[in-house]
């Protein structure tokens, strides 16, 4: 049932994003912070489009889809896929944002199917450096979260 909900979430978010004519995106690759001295590779795709202007501090909607590599540790031995929706605020080259994501399975790092994501970074020409933290803020179970840094290609 959770997989069906997850797939529906992804399709809804991507279809909503596809309606925008002024869409930007970033494909990023990077590394997640260590859990018991084991780091993991990360890939994420971010699609963004302008807001209507009603909210002065929010510049863009954002749909995020990502993958975190498994680690050879108990309860972290499966790859994790996540997808969600959020917002971004831009300050020149710098940006910050937040949102919610759903994960395809739970683990010691991400202990519920819903998570919050916080984002910060900088655009460097057609590249960007992005730091994200995904966590449920301790609402359910032990939740270490995933913090990762990506280098992305912007279009």
Image (spheres, rainbow, N blue to C red):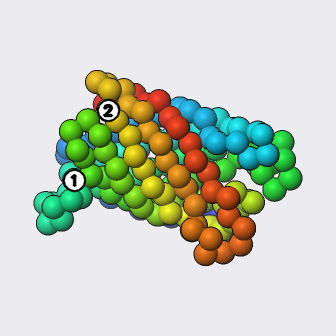
Instruction: Please tell me how crowded label 1 is: few (under 14), some (14-19), or many (20+) other residues with Cα within 10 Å.
Output: many
Residue 48 image point, x, y percent: 31, 47
Left or right: 45, with 35 as reference point = left
Task: Decide if residue 20 is in sight here.
Answer: no
Question: Under tag 1, what secondary structure?
Answer: loop
Residue 155 quadrant: top left
Residue 41 image point, x, y percent: 64, 35
Q: Residue beneath label 2, please?
A: 123
Which corner quadrant holds the N terminus?
A: bottom right
Residue 4 image point, x, y percent: 60, 66
- Report the disc number at residue 59: 1
In the image, is residue 70 above or below residue 10? above
Residue shown at 32%/32% (left/top)? 123
Residue shown at 50%/35% (left/top)? 150
Left or right: 94, with 148 as reference point = left
Residue shown at 56%/33% (left/top)? 30
């Amino acid at each position: 049932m959770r997989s069906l909900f997850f797939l529906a979430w992804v399709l809804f978010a991507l279809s909503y994003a596809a309606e925008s004519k002024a869409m930007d995106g970033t494909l990023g690759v990077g590394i997640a912070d260590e859990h018991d001295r084991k780091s993991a590779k990360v890939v994420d795709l971010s699609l963004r489009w302008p807001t209507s202007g009603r909210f002065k501090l929010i510049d863009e909607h954002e749909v995020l889809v990502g993958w975190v590599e498994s680690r050879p540790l108990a309860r972290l031995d499966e790859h994790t896929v996540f997808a969600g929706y959020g917002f971004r605020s831009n300050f020149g080259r710098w940006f910050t944002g937040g949102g919610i994501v759903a994960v395809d399975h739970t683990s010691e790092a991400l202990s519920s199917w819903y998570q919050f994501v916080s984002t910060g970074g900088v655009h460097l020409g057609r590249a960007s450096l992005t730091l994200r933290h995904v966590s449920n803020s301790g609402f359910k179970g032990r939740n270490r979260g995933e913090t990762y840094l990506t280098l992305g290609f912007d279009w």
